[in-house]
Amino acid sequence: MPSSRNFAVGLFLIVGILLFAVGLFMIGDRRKLFSQDFELYAEFKELSGLQNGADVKVGGMAAGEVIDIEVPPQPQSKFRVKMRIIEKLHPVVRTDSIATIQTEGVLGNKFLKIDQGAPQAQAAPPGSTIPSREPFDFADLLQQIRDTVEEVQGKMGDVFASISTTSGNANALIESVRGDVENIISTSRKVTDDVQEITDGIRAGRGTVGRLLNDEKVADSASKAFSDFEKAAGNTREISQQFTHILSEFQERKILQEIEQITKNVRQLTGQAKDAITDFQAKGGKGESLTGNLSRTITSAGEAMSSLAENMEALKRSFFFRGFFKNRGFYDINNVTVAEYREGKFAAGKLRQQAWIYETELFAHGSDGSEELSAAGKSRLDAVMAEFQRYLRNSAIIVEGYSGKGLTSEQFLLSTDRALKVREYLVEKFRLDPNYVGTMPMGAVASKDNSGTYWEGVAVVVFYDKPD
Amino acid sequence: MIERIGALVVAALAWAGEVGLFGLRALREALRPPFEAKELLRQLYDIGSRSAPLIAVAGFSVGIVMSMHSRSSLERFGAEALIPSVLALSLAREIAPLVAGLLVSGRVGAGIGAELGGMRVTEQIDALESLAVDSFKYLVVTRVLACMIAQPILTTFMSFTGIVGGFVAETVISDLSFRLYFDRAFSSMQFVDYVPASLKTVVFGFIIGTVSSYLGYNAAGGAEGVGKASTKSVVYSSILLILANVVLVKMIIFFFPEEIG
Amino acid sequence: MSANEAVIRFEEVSKSFGSKRILQDVSFDIARGSAFCILGRSGTGKSVTLKLMIGLLKPEQGRIFVEDQEITALHARELPPVRKTMGFLFQNAALFDSLSVGENVAFPLRRHTNKPEADIKDRAREKLAQVGLEHEYDMMPADLSGGMRKRAGLARALALNPSILLVDEPSAGLDPMTSAEIDSLLLNLKSERDTTLVVVTHNIPSARRIGDELVVMHEGHFIAHGTAKELDQSDHPVVREFMKSEGGG
């Protein structure tokens, strides 16, 4: 029997090894080990439990796995996640594909999701780093949304409260008139009705009054009286109708339109409203009741709208809306290079005001040669800022530093240092939003007097919107 | 009392040491010619091929039962889709290695213990030696090796028949295609779930082969001794196998910490 | 003592199992071509002596030579060449249960010769024919009677044409007729092939038939050594009693 026994052993071994290989292949296939692939990187501050071997999905399709996670060398850096993706999916992974860490189901494994890129973007080259979005921290997100919403709601509440006060006052006015009007109307109606009844009775009935019909005098005078009465009643009705019409128009249309207008022109209003309101207030100072109410309403609406606008700015800066506003010409001071700045790329389309201040005006020199803002320098800056005060809302300030001393690097350092010192002072003193105040080391710039010397000092530049 | 326990422990350790040396000798001898290929083939037939039906049937039943159990608990979470993956993972990681190990130690361990014990007491081992045959190589090395080779294969059989069993249980309830079931079964499995667990059964095979060969090869005392060797083979190799499993699982987790657990 | 060349030599060999001493300083020579019978009661160490000769057991003390080679100094791996020159017929034949009678006989041939399959089978059949089992080639050992098994065991022991044949209790468990048959087989072997026989037995008639030289073991010693006639005249009480017993079975 050895041959059948050998057969059984051979079968046993071969089937066993085959099955084992099938298992390996199934796992390897899931892990995409047997297909052509390429490697990509993505960086995250927060890994949320992503592990080596975690799935990578492109457009929801299993595309590979995380093969390595580099721990950041210092706290500020990010984790660098290396992943392997099958070559087949390369065409949809573009340079603008965004990597995010996601959870399978509610409690499932973490995996890396890669969005399909935009068609105009290039395919992500192997070994490149694609952009990533930090995993959502739901608590953070909700808190931020809640804060913003509450703030906006509060302001809106104020606006509506003022508006309802206004319309309340208008209503009171109307109400006070209405009593008289209605009295007139109801009285006239009663009179008319009575007359009507009598007339009808006369026309229909023959009784006591009917006999009077033979008396022409009586008939004439009666009919004259009737027509007079009728005329008066008709007038009264018309007047009261007109009044009602006016009131309802005022109530329904005018004020609502005003609100709509306010809401529609939220942004434009913010700047103008203030001026308009101050003007209005100055002129109509004596105006009481309705005018006063309205101006007050508009004032608070204006204020509400301006804080709404501020909130909009805050929204723009909050991370989840940032990308949305990027394309709208919103600038980021920190992302502008000196070269770009020189070319005027920064805040293109905005107006600028500039104030030059010489180094000698600004700084006192310490014993070690270091520069410190002098008292005179500070008051000079205060004067400049007083001049700029009217541009400050929604404006950016750039402190340009200049220095022509020494090597290029020394020029750079000194101009940076000067700009920074001035900026620090300005932000602190005038409570400026730090996001709106930048520095720009300009280095050596020849002075305009052709003396062959360089500018030494700073220039405070304010960029502001064209007045509409 | 303590002395008695102490003596017992010492005896147990001495025994374990002796068995361990016996096994090491088998491994060492396995590398030295002549290689008893023919006898190894015969042992593979006895230990491997002839255990395959038992293992397959057991795996199939285990698959069905486990599928039903995991269904009843996963259904509560609406996670029926995980059944194949849960089944395959538990089969590959633990159930198949351990159950196949215990089944083989029952079937093969007893067989080796009885066969070698019988050969010892009827002087067949001496007869082999008298015929200028190295009985250790001829009888022990071949059996230990056959166990080590057969065990991972039998474990693989059990895993796969288990998955098939799970599929059969599943088709009664839903009409999942086998292809999809099979894909899902491997969906969350990694090499580290599959390969180390399969390779650890080589150690199981070594334990079964060594312990039962040792007991049989050194049997004494006639027919009764043979019976004892056979019973002890099953008991000792099962216990050692379970203990070794604890150590091996610990080791696998130690060496591949992030992927498991 | 014998002028003939000694094939097997024991020099002050001692062997014990645990605390039980089996052999105590035993020395003797076995001459080539002779039939050496070791007699004694059960459990006196006859079989142990036989196993010592072929290296199945190792003595604690003393040296054992086979064909001038000191087997007690050999490593286990160096024993096979010596063993190939020896045959061993075990008490219960010790046929391999898993092999047929023919394959049992063919087994040593397959292991130690490179002959083609047909030659091996022919040789095995020939060996079986020598012991009168030419028709039992394909039977399994379990189906044979005790005598047939013993003859098959003899055929296997002789497969490699050994120059020394060790026989453990040839008549154990056999009826006197069958026992006599085995004895005559052994004697044939000795006369035809000049094989040295070492026979352990407690069957005196059998020993008388076969043995040129007889020893009686008692309590770990050889208490008598000589021909059957010499032993009959021994004044050692144990030997006298033993020689008279004619014990069989």
Image (cartoon, helix red, strand yellow):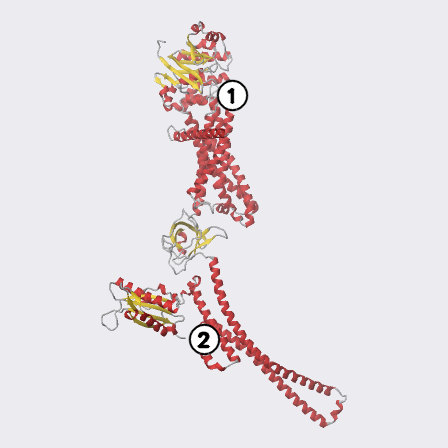
Q: Nearer the viewer, residue C196 or A133?
A: A133
Look at the numbered disc 2 and give the secondary structure of its residue. Answer: helix
Q: Which mark is residue B174?
A: none
- Mark 2 highlights which residue? A273
Q: Amino acid at mark 2?
A: Ala
Residue A137: x %, y % from top left: 46, 57
Residue C56: x %, y % from top left: 41, 20
Residue C200 visible in the shown view = yes
Residue C40: x %, y % from top left: 46, 12
Look at the numbered disc 1 and give the secondary structure of its residue. Answer: helix
Extreme bottom residue here? A217
A253 in relation to A314, above or below: below
A262 in relation to C181, above or below: below
Residue C87 visible in the shown view = no
B23 in relation to C213, above or below: below
- Mark 1 highlights which residue? C143
